[in-house]
Amino acid sequence: MATVVNMPRLSDTMEEGVVAKWLKKVGEKVEEGDILAEIETDKATMEFESFNEGVLLHIGVQEGETAPVDSLLAILGEKGEDISGLLNGNGAAPAKTETTAEVPVAEPKSESTPMTSGSAELPAGVQVITMPRLSDTMEEGTVASWLKKVGDKVEEGDILAEIETDKATMEFESFHEGTLLHIGLGEGETAAVDSVLAIIGPAGTDVSGVADSFSKGGSGLGDGKALEVPKAEPTPVKETTPEKTEEKRQAPTATVSSNGRIFASPLAKKLAEEKGINLAEVSGTGDHGRIIKKDIENFTPSSAAPVSSASSLGISAFVPAGEEVWEEVKNSQMRKAIAKSLSASKFTAPEYYLTVELDMTNAMASRKQMNALPDTKISFNDMVVKACAMALRKHPQVNTVWSDDVTKYAKHISIGVAVAVSDGLVVPVVKFTDHLTLSQIGAQVKELAGKARDKKLTLEEMQGSTFTVSNLGMFGITEFTSIINQPNSAILSVGTIVQKPVVKDGEIVVGNTMKVTLACDHRTVDGATGAQFLQTLKSYIENPVTMLV
């Protein structure tokens, strides 16, 4: 039977997509895992992978055309199969997208008929919801919180759950309506993309056989392929008791999930952060006590102490004296991704480090003059980023990527700027940095850093760096080394400006200095090359006027 492939929702805000390019033509064989097309969303252009196999019988959206989410994108089936009924709207479309699998029903089944593993039959109206792929690099997701309980009515467009990916925590919207009959993954649990997340259907429908069919290794989709699905009983969302919540938060008035996560919309979280409001002190008026925008706008701060950095991570801030206490906090998807990429860098790239001390006297004076101009706000970090871009132009060997057979020289310069966020570290990228003025660099860095902290960065904004700058000077760190952000060949670590005695013209005077350390991949950047890069960088920063001509 033919399978209808719909326009996928590839981001949490995507409402329509543009087919940038088809990778398959009508008549070609498609295997499961093949890239069907490149889809341009509101955030990035992503590869769209087929979760089915068969012959591409029909393309519903041509290259360059736009279509809403869930509209017909393509049809797969057997060679020569008649799909006129699907095209004319006369037949039911057995659809399977990145988020749901609507399985065609061969014959109406009685409730007493048992389900069998691998069977293609489902009770009428039942929808199996699978773990969505919410980013192009997502391989698994964690259910941060459920916004619906088993037995709740679900309307199309309702938020079912918050899913934590390797990039961010996103709201997952239901594309169907019905009753939530089964939850396949509890809060805090992790599963691979396409694993069973939930089952929706008519109220009272017995789906125990469906859940068992998936759990015992059958996909339940009639393809005979197993999904790696951790077996889980229907798990309604539980609110923590006041005693347990008080252990984690000072003012437990907000509704929290069983893993301690506060129910709040992304907009509410953003507003709370901007206003410095502790979400644990806010009472939610949304569904199931969820905190929404108006709750933040109407919030009156109490005299309760703010949540500490420990409690914001769900960790008890205090323990009884004389007791050894450990508390486990589940690793976020972002933290896992950071660990994986940095470990790969540290144990594959032969790194070495070069440190130089810069005289910041002229830089401080120049910055003061520039910031005296209307609508101008330049930071020392902006000056470092600009200097790096100009130095890379003179030392292209540092602007490279290593592979076993070739060294790739980037003819463009795009500098990543490391930004610390609550879950770890992200590196937004200032594209074509060498063509930007100091003011333009400053504006972009400020915008990207703000989006990073609000978890609003797009994939496009985090990709494509050719060099990276990491600055801990604002924390008073004088000198440190960073792990190279692969596939870059180097990363610059920037310390704080220190006032200390220095020798000038044979006399001891008060000076202002700053140390920077360059970590280099020895496969692409030799020691002498790295040293020459730092000398050029030093000349730019110590004489900022040279960056303006």
Image (cartoon, grey):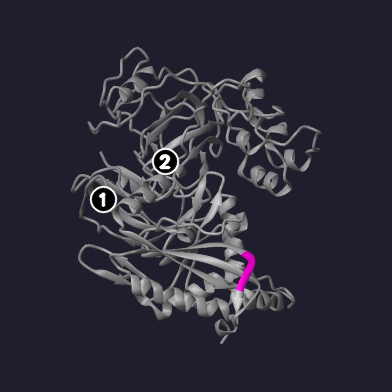
Question: Along the line of sight, which residue is nearer the eye, 122 or 266?
Answer: 266
Specify whether 131 is left or right of 504.
left
Give the mark nearest the N terminus, 2 or 1: 1
Question: Along the line of sight, which residue is nearer the eye, 438 or 9?
Answer: 438
Residue 473: quarter of image? bottom right
Give the percent coordinates (x, y) of residue 311: 62, 33
Identify which amino acid the numbered label 2 is placed on. Pro
Q: Where 526 sits versus 30, above or below?
A: below
Q: Is residue 499 magenta?
A: yes
| Image quadrant containing the N terminus | top left
User: Which secondary structure class fits the magenta region best?
Assistant: strand
Q: Is residue 245 magenta?
A: no
Specify whether 180 is left or right of 370.
left
What residue range appears in magenta?
498-502
List the residue tagged with mark 2.
132
Q: Is residue 450 visible?
A: yes
The mark tally for this picture is: 2
Give the percent coordinates (x, y) of residue 478: 56, 59
Question: Along the line of sight, which residue is nearer the eye, 475 or 147?
Answer: 475
Identify which amino acid the numbered label 1 is placed on. Asp
The CA distance from mark 2 to mark 1 is 17 Å
Residue 17: quarter of image? bottom left
List the residue tagged with mark 1.
34
Give the percent coordinates (x, y) of residue 444: 58, 66
> What kind of element bears circle 1?
loop
Specify whether 45 is left or right of 116.
right
Disc 2: CA contacts within 10 A as few (<14), some (14-19) or many (>=20) = many
Specify whether 120 is left or right of 416.
left
Give the percent coordinates (x, y) of residue 294: 74, 41
Q: Where 328 sits versus 439, above or below?
A: above
Q: Is residue 433 visible?
A: no
